[in-house]
Amino acid sequence: MSVQQVDQGRLQSPFYPRYKALDRLDTWHTWKGYTSADALFDGELEYFAIRNSCAVFDLTPMTKYRITGPDSLDYIDRLVTRDMRKIAAGRVAYAVWCNDQGQVIDDGTIFHLRDGEYRLCSQERHLAWLTAAAIGFNVTIKEETADIAALAVQGPTSYSVMKNLGLKGIENMKPFGLMHFDFQGSEIMVSRTGFTGDLGYELWLEPGKALDLWDALFEAGKLHGITAMGTHALEQARIEAGYLAAYEEFLPADETIRTGRSRSPFELGLDWLVDFKKPNFNGRRALAEEKLNGSTWRLVKLDIEGNKPAHHSYVYAKPRKNKKEIGFITSAAWSPICKQNIALGSVRMPHGKVGDSVWVEVYYQREMHWSKVMAEAKVVDKPFWFPPRRGATPPGPY
Amino acid sequence: MTDRYDAIVVGAGHNGLVCAALLGKAGRKVLVLEANSQVGGAAVTRSFADGYSVSACAHLLYQLQPEVRKDLGLQFALAADDIGTIALSADGKHVRYSGENVHGVSDADSKSYRDFHKRMSRFAALLRTYLNKAPPRLGTKDRKDLFTLAQLGLDVRRLGRKEMREFLRLIGMNIYDEVTERFDSKLLKGALSFDAVLGTHLGPRSPNTILTYLYRLAGSGGRLAAPAGGMGSVSEALAQVAREKGVTIRTAMPVKRIVVENGRVTGVESEGGETFSSHTIISNADPKSTLLCLVGAKHVETGFTRRVNNIRMQGNAAKLHLALDGLPVVNGLEKKDFASRLLIAPDENYVERSFNPAKYGETSPQPVLEITVPSFRDSSLAPTGKHVMSAIVQYAPYKLKDGWDDKKRDAFMKTAVSKIAQYMPDIEGRISASEMLTPADIEREFHISGGHWHHGELTLDQFLFVRPVGGAAQYAMPLDGLYLCGAGTHPGGGVSGAAGRNAARVILSREKSA
Amino acid sequence: MKTYDAIVIGSGHNGLTNAAFLAKAGLDVLCVEKNDYIGGASVSRNLHKDWIYSNCSYVCSLLRPEIFRSLELHRHGLQITPYGGSTTFLENGDYYGSYWDAEVSYRERARFSKHDADAYNRYSTDTMRQCRFIRDFLLRTPPDPTSFKPKDIRELILLGRKFMDMGEDRMYETIRFWTMSVAEYLDEYFETDVIKTALSGSGIIGTALGIHSPGTAYVLLHHYMGEVDGNAGAWGFARGGMGAVAKSIAGAFQGYGGELRTDAGVEKIVVKNGKVKGVALTSGEEIDARVVVSNMDVKRTFINCMDESDLDPEFYHRVKNFKSRGSSGKLNIALNGLPTFPALPKGSSLMFSDMHFIDSMERMERAYDDWKDGTWSKDPYVDMLIPTLVDPTMAPPGKHFMSCFVQYCPPQIEGRRWKDEEREAFGKTVIDQIAKHSPDFKSLIEHVEIRTPQDIEDQIGITEGNIFHGELTMDQLLFNRPVPGYAQYRAPVAGLYMCGSSTHPGGGVMAAPGANAAREILFDLNRHNTVPENFGDD
């Protein structure tokens, strides 16, 4: 007897046929085992679709868990640092979860689908941790990545597209809301969430209906500039929105070999997610101590002078480079919408207060030759891109 | 209305009583809640047939720390002291040992045993110093911790170069290699191997069994005694002292849960719904029961829960109690020899083979036994002219394939009795009543998860800094006001009182510094 | 007569490495070998027609890259080719494999348990953290914890600091890791028996312990701390067989002007006035040297080749009781063609992997019980590889060489020498186990060499055929290896040194003991050090 061999190549999401049909560039990478497009026809135009009209991104490979059972709220509340009792059914919470040392394992979104029923979407896979966290709780945790197809629909006209799709009541959905709709006889969940920092929605449904949804969506968006996009555009938008990426801004804490390579929520600028007034949660004791004694690192959003993206640069407190570096850049990009040279970085406390100036050592290559500049950078508070439409309810028909 | 106490001790095991008595002595208002109707936990005397009583688990006293006796002025009568050991041989050529002397072996073995005993006693004495204090935390800047660590290093160095090298070599080693290197006598090798693995899920070839051997010697240097009236007398005496110090002890009061409010313990609730308030709750129960059942995982963090869940604490020793209408006959033994501890462990490989099935969830078809006849020196335990035999029988793994039931217990009891009958041919005819406590029974009767007498294997990965788990070896749990004081904490099992005493001292010193 | 600066006894990879670094420092070095071929247990033997067998050690990962680089072994013909993956055949006809691609491996694990597939990340991180901790000490001399010499105290502090650097929680994990059994270690991560089984093998290879014996988690580390091209934990083949390792180091040695003599077995190490004088060969010839270095295991060195009266009695006693029980056997098989494994899909990359035929923790442990009873495992743990799939030099085209490492196999049967029919029966046990998963395997066999630990002792000279020159238990590791107080490569006779795997950091084709011993010798001789330091932060 020969046993069926596990798939040796990349997996295909249920939306793959539509992506493939639109693809002109044939440039793909692997995302959690799935084939995922870098860009389809023009990375720049795909990016501008996010900011000008409506861009669609296949989210299916994102790791998803379903958490059910009588203790599901207690379980999730112990798992993450924010108070989940405040997240009613029909709401979504961005959350971060830590190990006992208060170091971030991952961040993600938790969808309170119905009373006592949750979906947790994470950047990395955590079934072993989630299972360990379930000791003593009456909950069921099911990994459902392949069971749920998902699309992000992001951009100013995304609301109009949703309306056209016939989603009644969508106008009342606030950011981080979710609703269930009927779609051709099966259920579709729509949440007002995204990874672009713009007005946008995410659509979740059974894989069997994926292509039908795609077709209906593109039909509904035909007059609203709907465009499929790849990861390149999303990454650009992600940095503008100031969102964290695992393995860029932080490493999953239990997967660091060296000491001091993990980060706490405070060190990632996520103080607002840590709630000491709620009951016990993972990392609470360590975080209370850190709050008292101070953190080692600080995540900074940097507005850097000039136009040379500061990929992997060292950060200094003073322009003279014989000083010891105070940190490094974790993500960098030229923002086409803000016309700013932006970056996220990790610097040692007490450096990097909002309003401070730091210096970034930028290396860039022009026709084979490498050059170096020390660029001044301002630590800024707000995300680089935060349009009013992102928070407006009902959103306008932009 | 609920009563307020300075401290509530959950479980009146001997460690719980020691802890309560010491807190009482320091003027604290202490309540002890015990699920069973008598105090003592597993250190109780139990009547298993009309007129016959016996120590339920451990039947010999050798680990009780002198510091505990001294601090509490503890008094109880001994039925026998300095009990010798006889390693039984089917041919009647038994080996006897007591202290540093061994008889029935070659002169070379006899001399080697003296050296062995001397060295082991010296190492055990070093170990003993550390049994009576809380282990230091690693990686902290606390001066007391650093001092204790430095002292540990210094004490090891103070052994002298040669002995220090031996200590560092032996501490992780197995008893098998050490005894085969030193001795010729199979009986002696078998007996010492068995001593090292008594009450553990280890065979003599398992590394780590030197540590378990040293631990055995770390109370009274291996000197064995039997309390008059069985082990329960020690617990009763402890309870008596505790009451004198103003401690309230309530038996038949099983605790349902430890109440947690706003991140700290505030009291306990009994199965019957009674509540008792205190900001200090000390659990004598094992770490798993305490944290996962009484407190609940949601009040501690996941990494900690995982560690607690991973504690290895599956008992492997069964206890056999026989009511005998007279003393059995043993080839080569005189009547007075029944005052001794009798071992059935004919050689070191026999002991190892006896362990093998336990790894696969099976009982030993050829078990090893530690037998005492407590009634021989203590007439209160059996009717006149009759006797009670108490035997520890290994190996009987808690996690039996398909689980324990009455049939399997009866079968293992039969195996044990027929093993005894190989040495005491008339035993079967003399049995008027019998019982066997398997680890499953011990779990049920004494509320110890896994039925492990020591509330957790005593191996280097569950010892000192990492007992019960790393980061919580200092009796305080990561939940404000919650402490452990049972055998699951440092230094471990045995009727030693060290864990209870250490816990009490930690609690008092924390109150002082707070 | 000529007096050498140094004589190295034994041309195993450690002896040659030691000799090479001494010669590199300008010493006049002679390396003597009792066999008519060099390499000790790193050999390629032409024992059947056109086949080349790596008939002892068979894969390479532990060889320190610092040494490879420093001795420029590529110039002397050494090529290490990594091989991928591992396969465990299940009794129910299924198999469990690991692949080069992490995602594919994830999917394979997830086929058995999604939990375990995720847990693997934490497992490998935690294990690699321990590797990283120990790796810094591979090319260092263990400190003597009883000494107050500045050098020892400095090294102890370094060890302590590396430990403290981990932070509190990881220190506890480290204590536990170093003392627990591989089975219990794996239990803390995984729920699936076959996944645990597949990983547990590394905890007992070459070890006279079972997977449930405390201390075997460390042995796992011993097999993980190697690397190929910076890929930690990876294993590879030496092109041309493991003899290529010895040959290349010998090439380096001779390139530095060293002298190599085969068929020159040492009868005695000659001591005069408490100082080493040289060696006496079995031929009766005596050769003088200022320094003698033994690549032999400690028992052979001190019990067989020296007079008890020349040694400190305490030291002699400890060496005599040094634990060096052989526990591994080997089958080297010439095949007429490539055997098929019907469980594997056609073209599966797992054909290139190392294959195992035990699928449960219970079978693993039972294999050890047999050894304890003085016989070979009737259902052994076999680590099987076909190097000719990547190395065309070892068999004629279309033909193959198969290497089967077998755990457990005792050095003696019930305390006496092996009989020929027992050796045959041992071989049959292994062949039958493989044939259960490969129906055409038996028909392809052209020649089999069966090696018990006794054969290894008879041919190579390693006491009881223990592949690590002594067990890797805590009482014989680091400053306890080979015996407490003598872990710094110096024997208790002036001018006599040890450089074999009986010394820190132990067995495997690592070459670190040889290099470390060379550093100490050069220090004592006040010579410039030629031994490299470790690369750091790997």
Image (cartoon, rainbow, N blue to C red):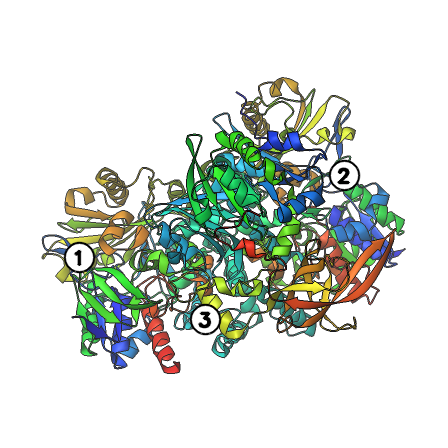
Q: Is residue C406 visible?
A: yes
Q: Which residue is mark 2?
A: C243
| Image quadrant assignment for residue C278 | bottom right
Q: Is residue C188 visible?
A: no
Left or right placement of residue B444 versus residue C142 in this view: left
In the rendered image of this protein, does residue C422 appear above or below residue A379?
A: above
Check the residue under mark 2 and report the chain it is in: C
Left or right placement of residue B96 versus residue A291 in this view: left
**Residue toward you, C222 or C173:** C173
Left or right placement of residue B491 versus residue C467 in this view: left
- Report the amino acid beneath label 1: Arg
**Residue toward you, A119 or C52:** A119
**Residue toward you, B479 or A367:** A367
- Report the amino acid beneath label 3: Leu
Left or right placement of residue C276 versus residue B372 in this view: right
Q: CA distance from mark 3 to mark 2?
A: 50 Å
Check the residue under mark 3 and report the chain it is in: B
The label number, if any, that marks residue B126 in the structure image:
3
The quadrant of the picture occupied by the C terminus of chain B is bottom left
- Report the amino acid beneath label 2: Gly
